[in-house]
Image: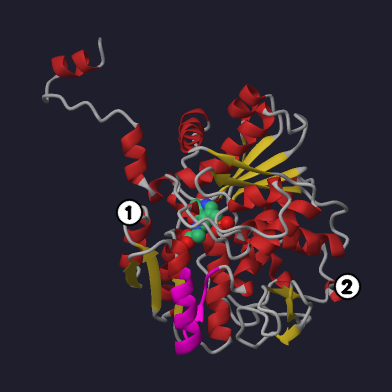
Amino acid sequence: MYFAYQHILMYHLECVNCGATYPADEILYNCTKCGHLLAVRYPTDEITISRGVWNSRPLSVWRYRELLPVRISPVTLQEGGTPLYHLKRLGEEMGLPYLYAKHEGMNPSGSFKDRGMTVGVSMALQLGKKSVACASTGNTSASLAVYAAKAGIPAVVLLPAGKVAVGKVAQALMHGAKVISVRGNFDRALEMVHDLCLTHGLYLLNSINPFRLEGQKTIGFEALDQLGEIPDRFVLPVGNAGNISAVYKGFLELNEMGFIDRLPMMTGIQAAGSSPIVRAIRENLPEVVPETNPETIATAIRIGAPVNAEKALTAIRKTGGLAESVTDDEILKMQRDLARKEGIGVEPASAASVAGIRKLVEMGMIDRNERIVCVVTGHLLKDPETVIKQCEPPIEINADLPSLLSALHL
Ligand code: F0G
């Protein structure tokens, strides 16, 4: 893909805490002055793109390239352009006529991470990096392996041993990443890979990398274009809290550019055994208190110390959003309901967003006429073991018609 840029707009990195700025080509993961998170800042008042031009392009991450940092031909597998489904039956059950799910499991590697990795791996090349790395609860590693393969560069991925769904490990292995299984949880694996990248020059592609989040903000842009109006509420499962921060940042930029006049209420859902953001919102804490032993069946969001917590708390608070937790049972019930009542196959973590809405509506926290977009983040086949455990096994029969009729009670 070749992009002719009419305006090569400059951008820079900015600390979300102290406001220190850094040139865009500096390889940094934290502010060197205060240690807080960085974000990419564009001169939004100088961007002349119209929504008409965007709408003339295919629905994909790259439709919005004027608001992305990549200035080379990107490493792409046609990510984004995922379906936005109206949840008619589930919405009727919950009394929510305008309930939607954006199915990010329909991306090339089966999760929303591909939006981040097409941008992140392209940035690795743009910045002259020769190898990439991440820690992961699974999906980030699968996606990084895929995009590193496409770029032709090596990838190292660190996984918490025994806590990653089998489909994700299979992807990381098959696409040729160096897969390291760490006897520790995700939070520890992330600290380790961060150290590795700082000391050995690999390019870190966890969501602490501000460029990766740029790709992920396009989930919000696409949903807005597909819905044709501003959603009232945007709901995401939260683990490391990168995605909710990214989508909020994207809406903020559209608001600065005058494309939208209000922001959706950003709503984060965590698993009950792993919910430091929910606690911080509930107790109005200035920052999260990390959980040392996070636990949930939704291994993708089994994270006790979300690195993007600072950004996520701002997103939820500034938009008047909500944070809620759901139990493993509530998550699995919604996974089955999405599969059987809407034909949407997602992994457990992904079902958390819609399960959270079911809970919030039952608690009376939501206006039933809201237009609600739930992001369902990863595909059913990522975690087949959790699926098989919940379902009746196939009925094995002898190879004759009477056996078939008997099995069908006919
Ligand atoms: N849903 C799925 C399926 C995920 O894989 C993740 C994160 C999330 C939701 C939460 O997103 O971290 O931006 O708040 N998975 C990461 C990984 C941590 O390593 O694959 P977040």
Residue 126, given in percent of the width and then of the height, sits at 58, 85
Magenta segment: 190-206
Q: CA distance from mark 1 to mark 2?
A: 46 Å
Residue 302, given in percent of the width and then of the height, sits at 47, 53
**Which residue is found at the position 21% from the left and 17% from the top?**
407
User: Which disc number belongs to residue 45?
Assistant: 2
The kind of residue on which mark 2 rests is: Asp
The answer, for residue 57, to whether it is visible in the render is: no
Q: Quadrant of the C terminus?
A: top left
Which class describes the residues within 10 Å of circle 2: few (<14), some (14-19), or many (20+)? few
Above or below residue 269? Residue 130 is: below
Name the residue tied to disc 1: 166
Is 321 situated left or right of 124 in this image?
Answer: right
Residue 369, given in percent of the width and then of the height, sits at 78, 31
Tell me the chief SS of the magenta region: helix
- Hey, which quadrant is residue 81 in on the image? bottom right
The answer, for residue 151, to whether it is visible in the render is: yes
Say how many tags the image has. Answer: 2
Above or below residue 126? Residue 355 is: above
Residue 289 belongs to magenta span: no
- Hey, which quadrant is residue 153 in on the image? bottom left
Q: Nearer the viewer, residue 89 or 49?
A: 89
Q: Nearer the viewer, residue 51 or 15?
A: 15
